[in-house]
Amino acid sequence: MSTGGTSRGVCATKLGVQILEQAKVTQRKQYDGALSYELIAEEASISTKTVQRFFNQENISRENAIAICNVLGLSIFEITNAVDKSSSRLEVPEGQVPIDSPFYVERLPIETDCYSAIQIPGALIRIKAPRQMGKTSLMSRILNSAKHSGSQTAFISLQEVDSALLQSLDRFLYWLCARIANRLKMDEGLENLSDEWMTTLGSKSKCRDYLQECILENLTTSLVLGLDEVDVLFECPQIASDFFGLLRTWHEEAKINPILERLRLVIVHSQEVYVPLDVNQSPFNVGLAIELPEFKEEQIVDLARRHGLEWAAKWNDYSNYSPLQELRAMVAGHPYLVRVALYELARNRLSIKELVEIAPTEEGPYQDHLRRHLINLQQNQALMKAMKDVVSANGPIKVESSIAFKLKSMGLVKLRKNSIVPLCNLYRTYFRDRLGNNQ
């Protein structure tokens, strides 16, 4: 599979795979009833594994996808964009986007870079973005790609941790090891974990030894460990410092330890890392750093089409007034906000004009989202004052650096050199109204 700088990865949709399979059947007469992955690969001058990946809805290079489609007499656009409008239902835009969802929008080359990086022994990938930007959806796809490549995977959200466990490094690391064993269906090893934890070794040493001797040494493949919502630990500086230092140690030791090199890490967080960490003990300055961007215009247009919005085809003239301009002015390219808008429009409950009018109100579809942000701001007077100043200004303004980055981590503003502006008109209008009378 080609993953070079100029080759953009593509994958078949769920319906696209059905079309591929049907084409295999209909084309068999031409190939004397013996059309197979091997024959398709031979005709397309690519590997059988690449053909299998395409039929499994995995990313391959666009050139290879086109070659496969040519053999089957199909269009690449048809296979990578097909959505069954008659049988598929709209997805409620909440939480992570399912693996087989036709509504997941790739932000290439991010996905292909991650799929390649996770194959490297001892890999570490860091994904950072505000809430509801698609971090967990991306991580689930990285783990899915690794699983299809033969790795074992374990997804752990630190939101699952009981607050009582965050009072002790020893109890937190015991919980982490138990969760890893549970995810890997290695619960029989929990007896070993209990025995291991009775030793006099320090918590970090016990965790490392258990991971290596009871988990990694009993696996025949690599282990990709996905750690979601690690922001939880930012409120526990002592645990955070030790734990994040441990992750960095594992990453470094993987370079010389053939057992630990089987461990690959994916770390996901929303906030800036304010926990004081020694530069040589931090996992946040090594590995592959991914900061998820907003959707671009063409991605919004594509997603609108997937929602069955026929007028999306008219969004190709950006020089003139269009629904795209209204939508982008209201929600910018924020993935969640865009999906909510398209979901409402696809249900024919609102016109674009009605959506724009009602969006920044308590009556609109963003009411819970906006209220959550408002409550968070009200709990921090400095942030609330800064946000009030930002939405009241007619242009970019400068605020204290730490405040600017906290607001950016919340997804409320974007940077303009050393100044900030509201992310979108939705936030400007809503918070101008809600914060206008606050002192």
Image (cartoon, rainbow, N blue to C red):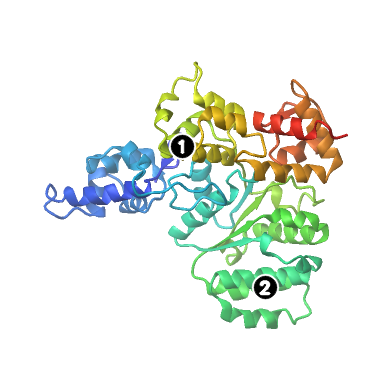
Compared with 221, 321 (above or below) is: above
Q: Please tell me how crowded label 2 is: few (under 14), some (14-19), or many (20+) other residues with Cα within 10 Å.
A: some
x and y percentages locating residue 163 in the rendered image: 76, 65
The residue sitting at the top extreme is 320
Compared with 277, 163 (above or below) is: below
x and y percentages locating residue 100 in the rendered image: 43, 52
Name the residue at 47% across, 54% down.
145
Camera-nearest residue between 242 and 339: 339
Q: Of marks 2 and 1, which one's residue comes earlier in the chain?
A: 2
Residue 247 is left or right of residue 47, and the answer is right
Question: In the image, what residue type sits under mark 2?
Answer: Asp
Q: CA distance from mark 2 to mark 1?
A: 57 Å
Residue 209 - label: 2
Question: In the image, what residue type sits under mark 1?
Answer: Asn
Residue 439 is left or right of residue 47, and the answer is right
Q: Nearer the viewer, mark 2 or mark 1?
A: 1
Label 1, secondary structure: give it: loop
From the image, tell me which residue sits under label 1: 348
Residue 92 - label: none
Name the residue at 41% across, 42% down.
10
